[in-house]
């Protein structure tokens, strides 16, 4: 070998030692004929301990079947192999994954005499990928089992993520939702509703906490408390939403609200709520100048009814009169039970003549229609006071006081009558 050739081989070897990848060649029996420094580092041995030896010295072959199979494939078929290979390396006492390229080596007569290989260690990358995969799985389990609907959408209304609860709410598989635009998969009204609040979030760039009402695929109304947070990743503007179903809570709240406004016996509004509504209606009438009538109705000698037929029969009478009144009034009239046997009615947009007719009709009906109770049929007549909003009424309370006086006079004058106080 010439000095020049030796020098060139030395340069080449130095270069191969510095490549970073493992570079090697083997003969037909799988014995190493060349290894670079990276291979020696992996095996943690010197060159003389590696050259001439096969892989049984460096790998636990029982756990490294791929090495043998890949080498055999290259040397028997002459094909070039490019793939991942997992070996159990004795020096590390653990599995390592390599990206390998293995090529056959030919002699001058085109016979395969060995192989040449390059292997890049990708174990860390694989470990990282498998960790990410595990963490994703863990995250999926958490997100799918948490009692909230969780989703991610971009500003073009495309779903980037939904958990299993969202999928079941929409009645579609997750795979059909991710990548789809909300207007393509959701009912028009629901999509428009989401779009409006989402647009507000993108415009403000601020977190939102809102109550949302959604009709599910079975047509049930559901209520949600939703928190939406803006999020930007690689220039893609999106939002992450967390919606917790509060339907039961909402319905309970509604029920309490109703109960607080309702008389338990008749189901009519109670005195407290009546006054609240009446004050509102009074102010509206003041502004518009529309006529506005108020009636107060009291059952005559109700104590006698109770005494004669019993309290439960008295209750029946109260309930029936409530129904009779509803039947005699318009939807916009406001009816309430404001005391034991006392009812009050607001008639908006109603002049004196019309209100008098209504009052007289009610009085007449009650005086001529007995009410069937478990005990007996009971004729429960009524006295009614009627007033109209006057120019000098500046509060509802002043009307309320006047109607009380009118009712008192109806009682004084012999009951079963309507007394109107109008100037
Ligand atoms: N059954 C029943 N009776 C009630 C209820 N609330 C109040 N009452 C009764 O209503 C009666 C009201 O009696 P009074 O205020 O003396 O009036 P009245 O007997 O109707 O006589 P006048 O109003 O003067 O015609 C009392 O006996 C109360 O016990 C109720 O929820 N159910």
Image (tube, helix red, strand yellow):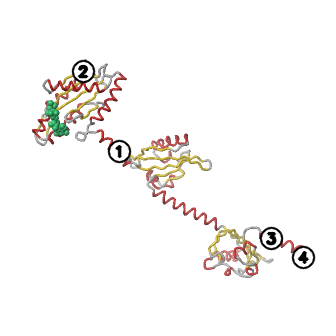
Residue plotted at (12% across, 25% down) = 414
Few, some or many residues within 10 Å of mark 4 (<14, 14–19, 20+)? few
Q: Compared to 154, does 326 lie above or below? A: above
Q: CA distance from mark 2 to mark 4?
A: 131 Å
Q: Is residue 243 left or right of residue 403?
A: right
Q: CA distance from mark 3 to mark 2?
A: 115 Å
Q: Please tell me which of labels 3 and 4 falls first in the chain.
A: 4
Quadrant of residue 350 within the rendered picture: top left
Quarter of the image that includes the N terminus: bottom right
Q: Is residue 332 left or right of residue 8?
A: left
Few, some or many residues within 10 Å of mark 3 (<14, 14–19, 20+)? few
Residue at mark 4 = 2
Q: CA distance from mark 3 to mark 1?
A: 80 Å
Q: CA distance from mark 3 to mark 4?
A: 18 Å
Residue at mark 1 = 253
Residue plotted at (45% across, 56% down) = 146
Asked whether the beta carbons under mark 3 and mark 1 sit within 8 Å of each other, the answer is no
Question: Which type of secondary structure does the marked residue at label 1 adopt?
Answer: helix
Residue plotted at (44% across, 47% down) = 225
Q: Residue 14: give its label.
A: 3
Quarter of the image that includes the C terminus: top left
Few, some or many residues within 10 Å of mark 1 (<14, 14–19, 20+)? few
Q: Is residue 88 left or right of residue 401?
A: right
Residue at mark 2 = 353
Q: Position of residue 105 (x, y in %)?
A: 76, 75
Quadrant of residue 276 within the rendered picture: top left
């Amino acid at each position: 070998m010439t000095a020049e050739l030796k020098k060139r081989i030395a340069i080449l070897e130095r270069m191969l030692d510095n490549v970073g990848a493992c570079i090697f060649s083997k003969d037909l029996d799988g014995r190493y004929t060349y290894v670079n420094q990276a291979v020696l580092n992996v095996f943690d041995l010197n060159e003389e301990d590696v050259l001439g030896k096969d892989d049984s010295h460096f790998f636990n072959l029982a756990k490294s079947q791929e090495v043998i199979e890949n080498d055999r494939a290259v040397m028997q078929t002459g094909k070039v192999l490019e793939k991942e290979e997992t070996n159990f390396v004795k020096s590390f006492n653990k599995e390592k994954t390599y990206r390998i390229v293995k090529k056959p080596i030919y002699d001058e007569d085109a016979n395969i005499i060995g192989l040449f290989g390059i292997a890049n260690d990708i174990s860390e990358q694989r470990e990282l990928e498998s960790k990410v995969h595990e963490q994703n799985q863990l995250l999926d389990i958490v997100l799918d089992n948490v009692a909230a609907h969780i989703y991610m959408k971009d500003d073009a209304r495309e779903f980037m993520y939904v958990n299993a609860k969202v999928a079941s709410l929409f009645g579609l598989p997750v795979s059909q939702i991710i990548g789809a635009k909300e207007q393509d998969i959701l009912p028009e009204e629901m999509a428009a509703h989401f779009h409006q609040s989402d647009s507000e979030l993108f415009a403000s760039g601020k977190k939102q906490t809102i109550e949302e009402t959604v009709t599910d695929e079975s047509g049930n109304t559901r209520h949600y408390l939703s928190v939406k947070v803006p999020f930007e990743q690689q220039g893609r503007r999106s939002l992450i939403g967390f919606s917790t179903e509060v339907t039961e809570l909402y319905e309970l709240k509604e029920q309490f609200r109703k109960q607080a406004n309702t008389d338990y016996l008749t189901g009519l509004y109670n005195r407290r709520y009546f006054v609240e509504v009446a004050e509102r209606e009074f102010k509206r009438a003041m502004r518009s100048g529309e006529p506005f009538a108020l009636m107060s109705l009291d059952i005559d000698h109700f104590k006698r009814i109770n005494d004669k037929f019993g309290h439960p029969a008295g209750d029946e009478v109260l309930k029936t009169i409530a129904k009779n009144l509803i039947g005699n009034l318009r939807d916009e009239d406001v009816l309430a039970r404001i005391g034991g046997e006392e009812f009050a009615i607001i008639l908006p947009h109603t002049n004196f003549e019309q209100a008098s007719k209504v009052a007289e009709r009610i009085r007449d009906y009650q005086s001529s229609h007995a009410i069937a109770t478990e005990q007996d049929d009971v004729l429960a007549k009524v006295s009614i006071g009627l007033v109209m909003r006057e120019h000098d009424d500046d509060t509802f309370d002043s009307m309320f006081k006047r109607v009380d006086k009118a009712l008192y006079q109806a009682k004084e004058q012999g009951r079963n009558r309507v007394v109107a106080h109008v100037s």
